Amino acid sequence: METIKMIAELLFALLILTGALLSAASSVGLIRLPDVYLRSHAAAKSATLGVLCVLSGAFLYFAFFLDFISAKLLLGIVFVFMTSPLAAHLTSRAAYRSGVPLWNRRIQDDLKEVLEKERTETEPSSS
């Protein structure tokens, strides 16, 4: 029984450590990446996964070793899972629509054609 507890404790610690490393990688991405869109991507993906790993590891530790189900940790997990990717998407969309330039070595811009088509359809005709 002690061996199972020790293995579970190591797994939960590994989950928390993985989350911390992913969050650190996210901060490096925020500093090193060239434009707002790539930085937003780094923050949305790795930071969200990092925070979810840390919160999940803490939740599992409390649940298995202290017999305590934390509603706050569960709400934190759900809140971060729902809001962080959505916030990153909306921030990038607002930046694009307000004219923040893309990285000069960007190869593809799928949204440009869609927005130009949308603008031409909504403009009143001059007849």
Image (spheres, helix red, strand yellow):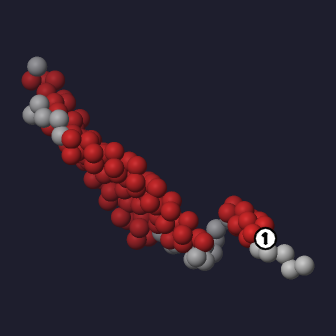
The residue shown at (69%, 61%) is 110
Looking at the image, which is closer to me, 91 or 27?
Answer: 91
User: Relative to residue 95, is residue 68 drawn left or right?
Assistant: left
Name the quadrant containing residue 111: bottom right
Q: Amino acid at mark 1?
A: Thr
Percent coordinates x, y for residue 82 in the rendering? 40, 49
Label 1 element class: helix
Which residue is denoted by mark 1 in the rendering? 120
Residue located at (46% from left, 56% from top):
86
Residue 28: percent from left, percent from top: 38, 65
Which of these two is toward me, 59 or 50? 59
- Left or right of 124, for residue 46: left
Q: Which image quarter holds the N terminus?
A: top left
User: Which residue is at a point 26% across and 42% down the rendered structure image?
Assistant: 74
Given the current orientation, which residue lies at the most extreme front position?
127
* Residue 12 seen: yes
* Outermost bottom residue: 126
Mark 1: few, some, or many residues within 10 Å (few <14, many ≥20)? few
Between residues 98 and 102, which one lies in front from this camera angle? 98
Residue at far top of view = 1
| Vertical position of residue 91 compared to residue 99: above or below | above
The answer to whether one can see residue 46 in this image is: no
Expressed as whole percent of the image width and height from the top left, the position of residue 114 reads 72, 62
In-image side of 35 versus 124 (left or right):
left
Q: Position of residue 47 (x, y in %)?
A: 37, 56
Compared with 98, 13 (above or below) is above
Locate the C terminus by quadrant. bottom right
